[in-house]
């Protein structure tokens, strides 16, 4: 082929590439599916398992996705003594729950982009793992997140909780009279609700409350009765963190000046 012919061929290919309108790298269809849920946590709380995660707002390519309609959660249960457990072996999982974000069941709560789910169908001596898969309104399934395994033990003893009412704040103090042998007390989680705002699965505190310090709850409304409960956080010999049984409920309102 002559030099003129080769030049014409190059120009022709260039024009075709320009005409197709493609810009930048190709994005494959599987990159358009929702990304896996993030901020996944799972732990035993009393006699149930509580998990939480963030609903994805981006696809696998990092672009915004706004049509996530629900979440499918599958579960694997195994004898805690069973060896060579494989958390990623999908054949061992069965469907636990299909959650539609517009109609969440009673064992589920949403706080912004975070979902909290309680699994009460668990037994002592078994470990549980979960896979969490988002899906869109069009039925497209996203990437999967797999939780760590949680070994369920006998519910750990509840702490004691007291409240002190002051003019501008309520002060709460939790203590544990019984600390199971081999465990380490990490602190406490505090939960709050009112007559018009139901009890949240999300703790009031961001970090565990020290057993030597009061928790000060301020910015409260006057003449509103606030109810509280607490759960102790224990680190088990296995390294797992377990939330204890729930304390008795205490209530208080801001004191008159």
Image (cartoon, rainbow, N blue to C red):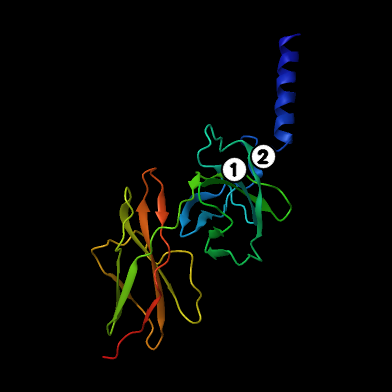
Q: Are marks 2 and 1 in contact (CB under 8 Å)?
A: yes
Residue under pointer 2: 30
Q: Calculate the distance from the C-alpha at mark 2 to the C-alpha at mark 1.
A: 8 Å
Tell me, for residue 143, which label it has, or none.
Answer: none
Quarter in which the N terminus is drawn:
top right
Q: Residue at x 36, y 44 (%)?
A: 237
The mark tally for this picture is 2
Q: Is residue 201 left or right of residue 138?
A: left
Nearer to the camera, 180 or 147? 180
Q: Residue at x 39, y 42 (%)?
A: 238
- Mark 2 secondary-structure assignment: helix
Q: Is residue 95 left or right of residue 156?
A: right
Question: Which is more toward the observer, 124 or 72?
Answer: 124
Which circle marks residue 60 in the picture?
Answer: 1
> From the image, which quarter does the C terminus lie in?
bottom left
From this view, report whether residue 202 is shown above or below residue 144. below
Instruction: Specify the quadrant of the image occupied by residue 252.
Output: bottom left
Secondary structure of the residue carrying tag 1 is loop
């Amino acid at each position: 082929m002559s030099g003129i012919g080769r030049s014409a061929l190059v120009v022709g290919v260039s024009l075709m590439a320009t005409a197709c309108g493609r810009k930048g790298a190709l994005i494959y269809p599987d990159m358009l599916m929702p990304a896996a849920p993030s901020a996944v946590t799972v732990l035993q709380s009393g006699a149930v398992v509580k998990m939480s995660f963030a609903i994805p707002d981006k696809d696998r390519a990092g672009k915004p996705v706004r049509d996530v309609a629900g979440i499918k959660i599958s579960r694997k249960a195994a004898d805690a003594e069973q060896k060579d457990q494989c958390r990623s072996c999908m054949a061992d999982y069965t469907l636990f729950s299909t959650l539609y974000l517009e109609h969440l069941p009673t064992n589920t709560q949403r706080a912004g982009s975070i979902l909290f789910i309680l699994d009460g169908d668990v037994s002592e001596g078994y470990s549980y793992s979960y896979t969490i898969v988002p899906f869109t309104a069009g039925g497209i399934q996203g990437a999967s997140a797999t939780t760590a395994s949680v070994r369920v033990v006998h519910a750990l003893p509840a702490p004691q909780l007291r409240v002190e009412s002051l003019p501008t704040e309520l002060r709460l103090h939790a203590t544990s009279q019984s600390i199971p042998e081999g465990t380490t007390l990490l602190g406490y989680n505090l939960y709050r609700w009112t007559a018009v705002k139901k009890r949240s699965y999300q703790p009031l505190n961001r970090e565990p409350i020290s057993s030597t310090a009061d928790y000060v709850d301020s910015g409260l409304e006057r003449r509103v009765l606030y109810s509280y409960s607490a759960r102790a956080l224990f680190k088990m010999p296995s390294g797992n963190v377990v939330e204890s049984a729930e304390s008795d409920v205490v209530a208080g309102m801001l004191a008159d000046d």
